Structures are given as C-alpha cells and as structure tokens.
Amino acid sequence: MSQDADAPTPFDDLDRCLELPRVGGLALSPDGTRLVTTVQTLDAKRTGWTTAVWEVDPAGVAPARRLTRSRKGESSAVFTASGDVLFTSARPDPDADQDDDEPKAALWLLPAGGGEARVVATAPGGVGGVLAARAADVVSVSAPVLPGAAGLAEDGALRKERTDRKLSAILHAGYPVRHWDHDLGPDEERRFAGTFGGDDRLDLRPLTGPGRQLDEHEADLTPDGAALVTTWGVADPGAARRTVLVAVDTASGERRTLVDDPDADAFVPAVSPDGRWVAFVSETITTPERAPEVRLGLVRLDGPDGPDGEVAEPEILADGWDRWPTTVAWLPDGSGLVVTADEDGRGPVFLLTFGAGAPGSGDPVTVERVTSDDASFSDVRVAPDGSALYALRSSYAAPAEPVRVDLAAFTATGDAGERTPVAADVLRGPVPAPALPGTLTEVETMAADGARVRAWLALPDGASSDAPAPLLLWIHGGPLGTSSAWSWRWNPWLMVARGYAVLLPDPALSTGYGQDFVQRGWGAWGGAPFTDLMAITDAVEALPEIDETRTAAMGGSFGGYMANWVAGHTGRFRAIVTHASLWALDQFGPTTDHAYYWQREMTPEMAEANSPHRFVADIRTPMLVIHGDKDYRVPIGEGLRLWRDLLTESGLPADDDGATVHRFLYFPDENHWVLAPQHAKVWYQTVLAFLGEHVLGEEPELPAFL
C-alpha cells in the first residue's frame, strides 16, 4: 500500500520503523478452531525485543487478542492434542524458588478453558524445539546438555561447577565448532519426551544421548506420539557433515534409520496423518561442477513393505518439477502434500497429489500451484477437514500477516478440468500492514546468453520523468536465494522514504527460476551473476523515473561479495555498501563455520578466478565496509582484510595523513546480522549518510556518539 506523498509513513523515521510490531510463527489447534501467532515488539528500554503470543480467529471475524504478557516474552507456541497452548518463556515461575540471574526458558502450558499459565517442564540449560502429538498427550522438547551428564539433574550440577569456576573452555572432538552466530558446545542438543497425566508436570525421559547429531535439527512427532522423526547429523570424510533421517521410539528411545543417502542431505521431515509415511526434502551433495538438486522425498515409517520383508527405499516425488521445495505439510486424508517453493520472485503454495490418491502407489504425482498472490507463504497449517489452509504471507509490499486460503475453492475444477490458483484472504491479525512511501513494480530484461532476468523495483512516491529518483541496486545474499519476501533487517522502504528507487534483482544462482538458472552461476560467481546484475541495472536506468547519473550498489553476505566484485569491475556507481562480505575466497573458504560445504564448490581454481581481492587496484568507488566481530559465517578477517586493502591498494587509497573516502562500520558484539535495535538504527543512519554524501551530494549527518 502507498499513500499521499505529503503524509509521513513509519519509514520516514527510524525510531517509528523500529516500533513497528513484527509477526512470526503460526500454530493451528487440532480441531481447527484456534490459531495462534507471536508478535515481537521493542522492550521498554528500546534496546531489545520481547515476544508475546496472540490468538487469531481462523474465520476472520473476531479481532486478534493477546494471550500472554511478560517482560521476558514468550515464543514457540504449539497446541496439545487437547487444545492447550504450550510455549517457552524465561519469565519467573511463581511456584518455584528462583535465584537465577539468567533464568532459562521453561515450557509453559496455557489451559484451553482459560486460567493462568503454569510451568510443565524445565531443564538446566533451557528447553526449546517444542513438539506436541496431534492425537495423544505426548510432548517432545529439546534441551542442551553437557556431554558428561547422564541426565538433566547431573547437567545442572555440572553447569553450576562451570559457573562457579568461571570456565568458558570447550573441548571439541569433531567439526564444526561454530554455526552462524554462536559457538557450539560444550553442551549438545538432546531430545526428551513426556506424557501428560494426573501430575501438572511432564516427566521428561531422554530419547537421545551425547553427541552433536542434533545440531540445528528438524523433527516431527507421529500423531499418536509413539515416534519422533528427526534429522540426524553424521560425519563424512574430510571433516564434512551429512544429514540423515531417523525415527526414535518415544517410549524406549530405540532408534532406526529411515533415510541415509550418501549423495544427499535430508531435511524437513513431516509425518503423514496415519503415521505410516514421512515426506521430506532431499538436497544432493554438490560438486565443483554441479549445483544442488532439491526435491521432495517419501519414505515408509510403519515398517517393512518390500516383497521379502525388507524396508522400502525412499522415493523421490515429482522429479520433473523444476522447483525447489522449502516446506511440506500433509492433507488430512493423506492424499497429497501442501508444499511451498520459490517461483519467479514469489513463494507460492503448491499442491502435490499422489497417484491413485494414496502415497506409495507408484503412480505419477501431479503438482499444481494453489495461490495466485504476488507473495511468499510460510508456516503453512492445513485445516483438519482439508477445506482451507492457514499461513503467514509476506512480500516486499507487506510484512508477514496471517491469511486463509480456501482449498475448497481451488479444488473446484473448471470446464476444462483445470484448477485455477486462488488469492489468500487476510485474517484479522494482531498487526496492521504499515503504509509505504512508494509503490512496488516488476521489471525484467534479457541477459546476453538469452536468460530472462527479473527484479522488483520499489519506486518513491513522486518519481517521474520530471523528478527522476536516484537508483540503489540492492543485491540479495545466499547465494541460493531470492528477493521475494519482507525483511526487517534489510528493508528497502527506509531507502525509498529518502527518495531512492531500490532495485531488488534475482541474478544467476537465484532460486525459483529452475535448475538451469542456478547452474548458470555455479562455480563462476563473477560471471553470470555479475552480468545479470549489470543487465537489469541497464534496463532500469533507461526508465524515465530513474536518474541514471546518481546510482549506488549495496549487498550483504553473498550480496556483499557481489558488491565487492562490482566495485572491482565497474566504476558506474557513485558509492558501494558491502556488509558481512566475502573478500578473499582463499581465506574465506577454510575459515567459515562450515568450510566443507563451501569447499565442495570452491576449488582453488574457482577461488582464484572469482576472488574480489584480486581486483582491489581497480576499485575507484567510495566503499562503506560493515562487519560484526561475532560473524562466524563470514569471519571478521574478511572485513579487516578488505579494509586494509582499500586503504593501501585500491584506486582510492588513504592519503599520507590517513584520510580516506572509504568508511568501516564495525560492530564488536554483532554477528552476521545486526540484531540489537539501536545497532540496527546506527546501521541505517550510517548507510544513509554515506549514500547521501556520495550519491546526493549531501553533508553527512551522523550521531555524535559514533
């Protein structure tokens, strides 16, 4: 939505933008009558975030209402089989003696019939990963446990000893040792299960033991709670890791392997309503020559079904469907799967229907697009009668909001027997969509090799041939990703509110355009991804609403890599902003948190050919470098080396007095993302000041405390 150019929007003021509530997560009760989500807001000091659970009417009639309220906040809401709401929170337990300066998250239960929430499970290191069986009173949680602890009680004693001795050392026996923004260890994730009975508390019984197999795991419970299906990390040669699927008996802890493909990782397990099948996402292990292939998989869970009693092999579904599935959920009758996937700068919902109406039939499956919205969908939940699905919908035009999709309307066939995608209906969510300072449109062009390259273009109100807007090329990260959904951290509307047109392209390596489009850039990051970016920029600069003489480029992570590559290969931009960026690939490859993943593509030859640092002498554009010291995906060494090289070897080096046009914004306490609210504000203030100086010719205005 846009509004009159003279009327201010929340994006005209950084403080107002930070105050905007943010919706995330969605859970549907087993009977389909209740829907809950969480809303994140600024805390009272405006230096952190707090989250509360809200209820949304699935019928879209009643207004949303807040269910929880505390200074510590609540998250990870799910429904039990009986309709109670479970959530995690570190808020004080009124029924316990608590003398902890840093309380850990406990599992709380809010009764379906009303009343006060109460604690039902705790662990010394906190609980998370909450799952509840759909047809039984079984709950599973994860909890970090020190490797030397036999159980939760001993874990508490060992933690106290570490605290008393002021110990922070971690002894590793495997790889990796870090992930994204946090150190791994010394504790390790374990799964536990409990059954509600006459006692108010869950008696958590261990399902798994010591080891790093559950790092960043994804899991699902069978409807009867008898088994937990989870991803399980295993070691591969060369300090590599691979993910398989296992089933764990929630009564005995007995574990058996369901999917173990040496050539692929398995993710996102989803158990069928009858408990007989598991759908999952399979991603092939890459090579220097071949990009990953991401497909849907299916495996039997309920036992042998081969001709001689052997366990059936997993089956790949819709192998000819040229899209990468991201999430999967079952129809209530088991006749199909509801799947999300990137497509053409959007993330629609698709319906996969099994041949003969049942999984495992061996008949061909069909895949049809369900939603027509120019948006991306997440957290998809299917109504128990199959008449509708609920999800969070977001796009660059609006942040996440709860919606309802009428599956009954979609399944009504037309005269030609074809089913037409339907638009989602917005429910009465807890947060209204904010007014925008401009409009969103779509642009595309043809690359030199004939490939179609498309993008979103956010134009400020008032941009015209008489008042053309300066252009900001905004390059997404990944690199396997797409510009398709709202981002609070990298929000183009804050730039649009200052008069910039923001171009959000999907160059080679972007998802949602087919396998060949990804393959175009595989192992050649400085090739098609770069030429695609320049081609779409050329096309947009030709529009009458754009001032082609005032342009800049920026990107983060892989987008920062591309910003660095752009800086060394063209002087067309007046300024370049590079955040958490890859600079010297021979240095990045071995030091990133999961080096084995990147080195599958990044051979020494690839790193040499595609490393931006080799072209530093050709950089003649002012650059703003931004990096956080706690970034483990792109270690701080990349930013430090880039900064030194700019000052000593670029075409715009520092003068004899050390003065330079370049700038380095450094966050000692931030990671790959800048998450603290006031740090995010400083980030935008610095970026806008740098762009204003070099693109608009303005005197830079920065906070005095920087």
Image (cartoon, rainbow, N blue to C red):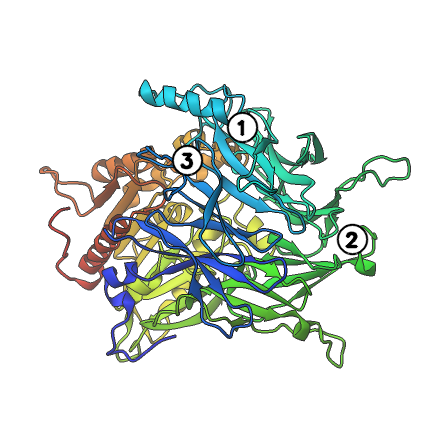
Q: Mark 1 points at which residue?
A: 212
Report the amino acid beneath label 3. Leu
Q: On screen, 416 above or below 623? A: below
Contact between labelled residues 1 and 2, with CB atoms less than 8 Å apart: no
Residue 323 vertical position relative to residue 603 in the rendered view, above or below: below
- Under mark 1, the amino acid is Arg
Q: Which element carries disc 1, helix, strand or loop? A: loop
Q: Is residue 121 left or right of residue 329?
A: left
Q: What residue did someone put label 3 on? A: 585
Find the distance from the CA under tag 2 to the CA under tag 1. Answer: 33 Å
Give SS at disc 2. Answer: loop
Task: Please tell me how crowded label 1 is: few (under 14), some (14-19), or many (20+) other residues with Cα within 10 Å.
Answer: many
Residue at 38% x, 53% y is: 51
Please name whichever residue, 645 or 66, is drawn nearer the observer in this view of the structure: 66
Q: Is residue 398 left or right of residue 80?
A: left
Q: What residue type is labelled 2?
A: Pro
Residue 359 numbered tag? 2
Pinpoint residue 561: horizontal percent, then vertical percent: 38, 45
CA separation in Å, label 3 and label 1: 28 Å
Say few, some or many: other residues with alpha carbon within 10 Å of mark 2 (under 14 / 14 to 19 / 20 or more). many
- Looking at the image, is mark 2 or mark 3 earlier in the sequence? 2
Q: Which of the 4 image quadrants contains residue 357?
A: bottom right
The residue sitting at the right extreme is 307
